[in-house]
Image (spheres, rainbow, N blue to C red):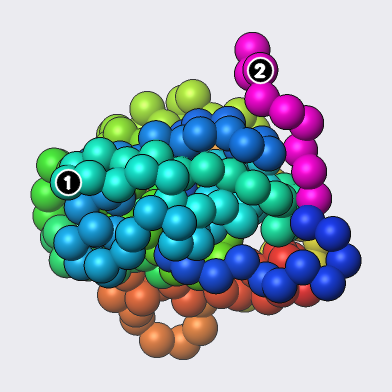
């Protein structure tokens, strides 16, 4: 249980917090001392040339964003002090991305852009045509964290371990899952979203598409809706980002 003081919001007229924006897993409250990670301490001291007393902004996905300052900084160690809440925590629409594993550069790019687009879960899946069965989820989680720091999000998406598609589907909680399907006759994404709202999930298959048996398995599941994403064949990473943008515009927090 936290022993910190109750949250204190910045009074009206308080300037917006400046300085680097950093994610922490620690609780945030007025006067809370927050340990810096070694990477954060190195970055602030050696790259940004910041010093004790300089401002920072802190968030943890639970307590909103806090204006704070550097309380101590030395080599790979540091402490931040939270001072006043600058923004309260706000709910985000639940938007999950299931993505067939692709090469590292493409996977990194999708993790960054999906975070910027408000995804709450990134779930790599292994399909029969996946070009790799290894996904460095720790690396993707770091990319997602940095993207959240840059794009002013108050939360960081969960990055799940890569799993075979059929196991992910077997354990699914029943929430609507939209699948980018190449099969002729699939309705446009806009039509499906006319009657759906978050929580939503977006599944994109590998280069070359799903095998017929995989697509048949998907379509047998009541929570799955195949949709078309325009007249062109898109690369996996393009389809992932385009679909997420459409979901946010038509049914998410862009709407």
Q: Mark 1 points at which residue?
A: 75
Q: Distance between the residues labelled 2 and 1?
A: 29 Å
Give the magenta range. 1-9
Residue 197 appears in which quarter of the rendering?
bottom right
Q: Provide residue 188's location: percent of width, then percent of height.
A: 62, 75
Q: Residue at x 43, y 51 (%)?
A: 70
Q: Is 215 included in the stretch rendered in magenta?
A: no
Mark 2 near mark 1, Cβ–Cβ under 8 Å? no
Q: What element carries label 2?
A: loop
Query: Which residue occupies the foreground of this view, 221 or 173?
Result: 173
Q: Mark 2 points at which residue?
A: 3
| 114 w.r.t. 72: above or below | below
Q: Residue at x 20, y 67 (%)?
A: 47
Horizontal side of residue 98 vs 197, given as left or right: left
Horizontal side of residue 64 vs 57, given as left or right: right
Q: Residue at x 32, y 64 (%)?
A: 50
Task: For the N terminus, give its image quadrant.
Answer: top right
């Amino acid at each position: 249980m936290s022993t910190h003081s109750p949250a204190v919001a910045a009074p009206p007229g308080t300037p917006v917090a400046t300085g680097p924006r950093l994610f922490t897993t620690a609780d945030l409250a007025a006067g809370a001392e927050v340990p810096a990670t070694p990477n954060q301490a190195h970055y602030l001291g050696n790259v940004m040339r910041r010093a004790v007393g300089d401002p920072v902004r802190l968030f943890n996905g639970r307590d909103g964003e806090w204006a704070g300052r550097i309380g101590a900084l030395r080599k790979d160690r540091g402490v931040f002090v939270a001072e006043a809440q600058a923004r309260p925590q706000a709910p985000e629409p639940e938007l999950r991305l299931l993505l067939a594993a692709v090469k590292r550069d493409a996977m990194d790019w999708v993790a960054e852009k999906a975070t910027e687009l408000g995804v709450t879960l990134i779930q790599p899946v292994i399909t029969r045509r996946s070009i790799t069965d290894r996904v460095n989820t720790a690396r993707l989680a770091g990319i997602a964290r940095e993207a959240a720091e840059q794009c002013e999000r108050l939360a960081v998406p969960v990055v799940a371990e890569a799993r075979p598609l059929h196991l992910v589907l077997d354990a699914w909680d029943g929430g609507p899952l939209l699948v980018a399907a190449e099969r002729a006759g699939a309705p446009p994404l806009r039509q499906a979203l006319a009657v759906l709202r978050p929580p939503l999930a977006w599944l994109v298959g590998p280069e070359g598409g799903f095998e017929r048996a995989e697509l048949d398995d998907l379509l047998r599941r009541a929570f799955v809706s195949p949709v078309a994403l325009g007249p062109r064949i898109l690369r996996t990473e393009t389809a992932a980002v385009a679909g997420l943008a459409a979901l946010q515009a038509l049914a998410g927090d862009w709407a």
